[in-house]
Amino acid sequence: MQNAAASAHVYGDPEGFVLREALAAYHAARGFPVRLENIVLGAGADDLLCLIVRTVIDAGDKVVMSAGGYPTFAFHAAAHGGVLVTVPYRDDRNDCEALAAAARAAGARLVYLCNPDNPTGSWVGAAEQHRLLDALPEDCLLVLDEAYADFAPEDAIPETDREDPRLIRVRTFSKIFGMAGARIGYGIAAEALIRNAEKIRNHFAVSRMAQDGALAALGDTEFRDFVRLEVESGRAEYAALAIGLGLVPLPSATNFVAIDMGTEARAQATLDAMQRQEGIFIRKPGVAPLSRCIRVTVGLPEERRFFAEALTRVVGKLDSA
């Protein structure tokens, strides 16, 4: 990326040809034989979610997702005239049966599933995802947001046909590859859907620096292994921390942990105190019942220690109030 910066005055490849070829080879080596024509690039997963909405829906079309799920997708759908239909989580997990039923009842054009999930960290298995896909209306597209797939158990990642017109899978370099600030991601779908998306995609959204960085990242297995192990350690530390404070950690297959604070008021008080008194930014889901939780990203060991000390102080004050 430093080398590419010296050429930042020159346009990058608007087609991302070399990177798309590398991505096809990367997935083929992992048992998912896709072609360059099945891949579309975007400036991170958020850009791709917007592109999917713009490609697929017209004003008034129904869009189904979990209530309290990743809000950016809902923002894009609403901004482009989509009518949101939401279903509640069940036991803090996406309810695939309810998503499918809502899609059929509404005649939905899009169904959004983040798996592993943001904001809960939960996951649904591949078989459950296949049942969801098979239960959708004929002209409905399943948007499978797999931003956290590299942290998930194997049975959470479904085997699919690259030319299945009912599905688009979204991946990002923001998480395990450590390139969140570079803004780069990609979608995998049937060639016909990719061709349509290419007609309206911002072709210069992904910089040459981001493309070169992504190429390098694909080959850096040592770094990915390091991140995966660090995240596993961090999740275990956060779970032990929560239990030690009398709180409940939600099981997570992501690079963050959601911690059940008991009530929404207590979660909000924790959020406010962590930011204002401790200088630590964490998140809280905005829709009940998940709004009783806080959510914290797994950082480096020293960052985790800093968080643990701060949360201990904050919870202690809440308990003594």
Image: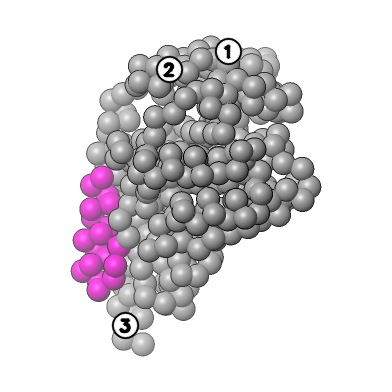
Q: Name the amino acid type tagged 1.
A: Phe
Front position in the image: 304 or 198: 198
Q: Is residue 238 magenta?
A: yes
Q: Quadrant of residue 191?
A: top right
**Circle 3: is it few (<14), some (14-19), or many (20+) Cα within 10 Å?**
few
Please identify the quadrant where the C terminus is shown. Answer: bottom left
Q: Name the amino acid type tagged 2.
A: Pro
- Residue contact between numbered discs 3 and 2, judged by CB atoms under 8 Å: no
At 28% across and 25% down in the image, what residue appears? 222
Q: Name the amino acid type tagged 3.
A: Asp
First of labels 3, 1 by sequence position: 1
Q: Quadrant of residue 308?
A: bottom left
First of labels 1, 2 by sequence position: 1
Give percent across and percent down for residue 311.
33, 67
Gap in angstroms between the C-alphas marked 3 and 1:
57 Å
Front position in the image: 142 or 208: 142
In-image side of 57 versus 307 (left or right): right
Q: Kindly identify which residue carries mark 1.
A: 17
Q: Kindly identify which residue carries mark 2.
A: 33
Gap in angstroms between the C-alphas marked 1 and 2:
17 Å
The prevailing secondary structure element of the residues shown in magenta is: helix
Residues in magenta? 232-249
Gap in angstroms between the C-alphas marked 3 and 2:
54 Å
Q: Is 157 rendered above or below residue 297?
A: above
Please say whether residue 2 is visible from this viewpoint.
Answer: no
Q: Is 313 rendered above or below residue 99?
A: below
In-image side of 294 versus 112 (left or right): left
Give percent across and percent down for residue 43.
60, 32
Residue 319 is labelled as 3
Front position in the image: 188 or 45: 188
Please say whether residue 226 is visible from this viewpoint.
Answer: yes
